[in-house]
Image (tube, coloured by chain):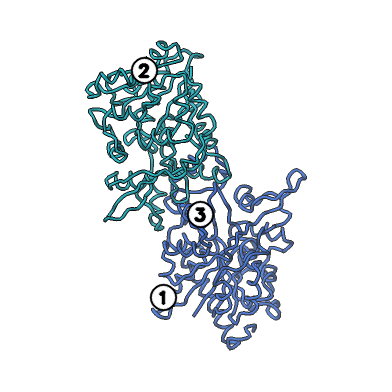
Chain colours: A cyan, B blue
Amino acid sequence: MRITALAGGVGGARFVRGLLHHLSGTRPGERPEVTVIGNTGDDITLFGLRVCPDLDTLLYTLGGGVHDGQGWGRADESHLVIAELAALGATPMWFSLGDKDFATHIYRSQLLGHGMPLSAVTARLAGRWGLGEQGVTLLPMTDTPVETHVVVTEDGQQRAIHFQEWWVRHQAALEAERFVVAGLDAATPAPGVLEAIRSADVVLLPPSNPVVSIGIILGVPGVRDALRGTRAPVVGVSPLVGGRPVRGHADVCLRTIGVDTTSEAVAGLYADFLDGWLVDPEDPMPETARSSGPALVRRPLLMSSVEAAAEIAASALELAQRLGTASGGGEVRP
Amino acid sequence: MRITALAGGVGGARFVRGLLHHLSGTRPGERPEVTVIGNTGDDITLFGLRVCPDLDTLLYTLGGGVHDGQGWGRADESHLVIAELAALGATPMWFSLGDKDFATHIYRSQLLGHGMPLSAVTARLAGRWGLGEQGVTLLPMTDTPVETHVVVTEDGQQRAIHFQEWWVRHQAALEAERFVVAGLDAATPAPGVLEAIRSADVVLLPPSNPVVSIGIILGVPGVRDALRGTRAPVVGVSPLVGGRPVRGHADVCLRTIGVDTTSEAVAGLYADFLDGWLVDPEDPMPETARSSGPALVRRPLLMSSVEAAAEIAASALELAQRLGTASGGGEVRP
């Protein structure tokens, strides 16, 4: 069995960690292969080093090295390098980078500097974190450098800033006009990305940001077509609990692209390929949406622990299995 | 008054620190300007980052941030970055880099990557360490990347390895055939280097390694001619105490270039421009060398403390003054 998931940062990583926890009970030899396609749209070059926040959050979370409290970065981290860079007058200082974390960026930048594609670099990093031993392959969505910029208005002037500056420094509080993903049009899916979607038995959309995480992956030419064309049921998990994003600023992102912050509207962004959709028990998404939309399952979606995330992942797999069986593995719409 | 010193790493840095300590007693307004021309021949790129060991040792030592016990690197240092790089499988691991130290290399590499010349980068770093406030200008000998390689014989096979690999990893114990300084022939002195020698009132040669530190600086086209042509007395401090280098492997380096490990032989390397020479009290250098060689002063040369180094520097300045007065500032040979 092959499971493919599209993932952003914290939410995606916690969902996949839950999925792996659920799958760890599988009998040896029957354990599904999991391929995670990570967003690289919020990658940024800081101090001359290439930082891939979503890939790193996936690596650290799945590898057991994440700072659980904050959801990103390394546990037991110190901050001597960044303090010394501040003393040297280096900028910017609004993006927190710990010492262990710096090593990841130094190593990645060195290998990229040698001409190694990001997917090969990511495979090396995945080796350090034992992802292979867990049956996981982590792929960046593309080897092409892409960067999400946000067009903001300040004092009546429009200017484009890097997504991370908007997200981290300004906490998404600067009025955003639109997102511009530099390089996305010309990006090609990283080796294995389209095949992982086409040959999957199940495709999962974790509760990642539908605009700046999943939305960016969907923008890589070929990915959306692969999702439309795959025989696998595609099951998503709404990022909204109680009508709000659990963390992050998905509501602001959705508003920026003119979409309501509702599970129904988010499902609408995936309408051309979404077969199943997990929403929170109190979600106002109408049952009548079933007739034309994805199969709905209501269940608690708060990933308050690894176990809670595992149960959500199990529900998603269960729904996928039901949809797959119902359609005989071909047409999966119920 | 303008003092110019050529310096390698630990020995040069400790001597210049002593010089500054001595000069700190000078009345305000009369304090000499000190220009230090640092060796960059043992620079190395590690993990994609440009490391300048001698410049860094000078910066940290003169700025009060050095690890005094080891003579290089930062005080109160930790080593999380290198430990994580080791976990990632990065190499080499024989060159110790602390976390604070990494920040220097990250910042330097970022600025070099933006096209800033090493001399401008070094000026930035010098700002962080307050060198200007001490009347010190630190110049790399050249902005041209140069690297000292060592041709070694192992198992009957000759191969060239980076100087740092020979020095740090093998502790100079691998039989060296010769040194090859890649890029040195085509190097140009960094802005200000030749002028600092030509316009100096005193030129000092600290007890740095005569082969792989001072010797490399002398190899930058134009530097040796500037030393021959300067009106300033040139006074050197022998790196040998009791007939041996105080630290490092100057004896091995001298043997490699076919020169005896004696103060007389080292002075011979500088014969075309050296006016004064400080040697240890027991140094076997014959007094008869005075007639044709530099003016000799015998005094203890062990830099066992900042104060001891200051007294050695004071002796060197005193000798320079005597030589300058004797010659009326023009011809300085006594």
Instruction: Residue under label 1, please give it.
Output: B25
Residue B222 x %, y %: 64, 72
What is the chain letter for disc 2? Answer: A
**Element carrying mark 1:** loop
Question: What residue occupies the far right of the structure in this picture?
Answer: B156
Q: Residue at x 26, y 19 (%)?
A: A288
Q: Measuring from the top left, give residue A67's x and y in whole percent.
A: 36, 35
Circle number at residue B109: 3
- Tag 2 secondary structure: helix
The Cα atoms of the two marked residues, 3 and 2, are separated by 47 Å
Q: Are marks 2 and 1 in contact (CB under 8 Å)?
A: no
Apparent side of residue A168 relative to residue B333 in the rendered image (left or right): left
- C-alpha separation, residue under disc 3 versus residue under disc 1: 37 Å
Residue drawn at point x = 53 percent, y = 37 percent? A121
Q: Mark 3 or mark 1: which is in front?
A: 3
Say which residue label 2 marks.
A314
